[in-house]
Image (spheres, rainbow, N blue to C red):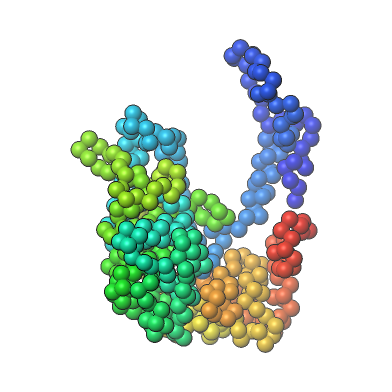
Amino acid sequence: MQLIFELSKKGRRGVQIDPLDVPDVSPPSHLCRHTDLRLPEVTELDVVRHFTRLSRRNFGVDTNFYPLGSCTMKYNPKVMDRIAAEPGFAQLHPHLSSCPAFLKECQGALALIYHLERLLAEIGGMDAVTLQPIAGAHGELTGTLLIAAYHKDKRNEKDLVLVPDSAHGTNPASAAIAGFKVVEVPSAPDGTLDREAFRAALTERVAAVMLTCPNTHGLFEPAVQQIAEMAHAVDALMYYDGANLNAIVGRCRPGDLGFDVMHFNLHKTFATPHGMGGPGAGPVGVNEKLAPYLPGPRVTKTEEGYELSEPIKSIGKIAPFFGNFLVAVRAYAYIRMLGAEGLEAVSANAVLNANYVLSRLREYFPPAFQGNCMHECVLSAVPFLQHGVKALDFAKALLDKGFHAPTVYFPLTVKESLMIEPTETESRDTLDAFCDAMIELARDASESPEKLHAAPTTTPVGRLDEVRAARELNCIYPA
Ligand SMILES: *Cc1c(COP(=O)(O)O)cnc(C)c1O
C-alpha cells in the first residue's frame, strides 16, 4: 500500500483557499519559511480513499471480537463519544480553569470533575480521587509516589514494595520509578498469592503491597483481607491495580477489602475506546491516609460554586491540567447511564462470559488453574507442543478466522498461556463462534499443524520473522 506522499501529483488540490480579506503584509524575512511545505498534493477523493483503505486494515472492537486478556477490549457505546464531542467540553480551553478570572466560565467542567471523582470514590470505596493520571501505569506511578510521600512524612524507613509474580509488568516498573526496590512474591500452585512466601517477605522495610484482585490469573485472591491486615500491621499500604475492575464493579469495593490506594483504568472499565496508545486515564483513589498528598489543584465545592485548592502536602502535578478530560467526560456519562444496577450487571456479564468460554474450551485447552474464573480465563496450549504447535500459532491462526488473538505468554507463570477476556459486552453467539474456531484450530493442530504454521494468510501482512521484526523495526515487509 502506498503512502499518501507517494500518491502526490503536482498541482492536485483538496482545498481552495479563499482570497485574502485582510491586508497582505510581508513579515520579516527571518519569520518566513524559505522552502515549500512538504505536503502531498492530492485531491479530497484521494485522501478519503487513502484513509478509508487504511482504516479497513485496522482490527478493532467495532469490527471484530477482541478477547485480549487483561485489556478489557469491550464495546463502548457511541453515545459517550457524542457527549465528549459537545463543544462545551471539547472546545473548552484548559487554561480557563487555572485563571481565577475565568473560573466561572468552566463551572460545568469543574462540576463534572467533582462529581466523577465522587462517583469513582463511591465505586472504589475510597475517600478521594484525582483524575490527573493519564494511563493505568501513570496511576500506579502516582499511587506509589503518594505512598512514598506518606512514609517520608511519617519518617518511616521503608524502601521495599512487594509485587506478586502474576502482576502486570507496569506494577514493578512504577514502584521502581517511584524509588522503591521491588520484591517479587511467587504464586502458589493454585494461582493465588503464596501466603507463606508473602509472610516471609513482609518486613518492617515494606512500604506497600501491590495487588490486583482478581489477579491476572483471573482469580479472586481469597485471602485478600488477611493480606491487607498483615500489611497494615507493619504500616505498609495496600495498592490496588484496578485494571481488572470490570470483574467486581458494582458488587465489591477495593476500599472495603482493605486497600488504601488504587487506580482505575477509565479506558478499560469506563467506556473510552483504547489500544494503539490512544488517550486513556488512570484516576487514583485514596483513603484519608493519603488524601493530603494528592496532586493539585483539587476541585472543591463551595456555596459560590466550584473552586480550586491545593492539598496541604501535595506531591505536585502529575499531568497538565486535569489529565485527559474528555476521557473523564465519557466515564461520567457511562457511569450515570448504567447506574448502580447497570454496573452490577457489568461484572455479572464479564464473569459469566469468561466462565462460558472456559467451560466450552477446557477439554481442548487445559485451564492453568482449577475451578471457576472471574473476568478472564487462562488456558494452555501445552498439549499441542507435541505437534510443534505453540500458543503463538493459535494467536496467528485466529486472525484468519476474524478474531483478535488472546493475550499469549502472559501471565509469565503459565507455560504456553492463552489468556482470554471475552468482556461483558459480547453476545453468546459471538462467544460460540470464537469457541468453535478455537476447537477447529485444536483439531487442525493435531491433524495438520502446517495450517497453523502458515497463518495468518488473510491479513495485509503475513507471518513475520519474529526475531527480525524485533531487531529491524524499520524494515519494510511485503504487503
Ligand atoms: C492494562 C493494565 C495496566 C496498565 O494500564 P495502562 O493504562 O495500559 O497503562 C496495569 N495492570 C493491569 C493488570 C493491566 O491490565
Residue 8 in view of the camera: yes
Q: Up-down: is 81 above or below 463?
A: above
Residue 174 placement, left or right of 154: right
Residue 425, x across and y down, in percent: 45, 62
Q: Quadrant of residue 206?
A: bottom left
Between 414 and 373, the residue placed more toward the observer is 414
Q: Quadrant of the C terminus?
A: bottom right
Residue 199, x across and y down, in percent: 37, 81
Q: Residue at x 64, y 84 (%)?
A: 384
**Residue situated furthest left in the rendering:** 303
Residue 179, x across and y down, in percent: 46, 62
Q: Residue at x 64, y 53 (%)?
A: 56
Between 17 and 197, the residue placed more toward the observer is 197
Q: Up-down: is 291 above or below 260?
A: above
Residue 70 in view of the camera: no
Residue 115 placement, left or right of 267: left
**Residue situated furthest top in the rendering:** 23
Number of labels in the image equals 0
Q: Quadrant of residue 303?
A: top left
Between 16 and 184, the residue placed more toward the observer is 184
Q: Residue at x 54, y 64 (%)?
A: 66
Q: Up-down: is 448 above or below 460?
A: below
Q: Quadrant of residue 45?
A: top right
Q: Residue at x 46, y 74 (%)?
A: 183
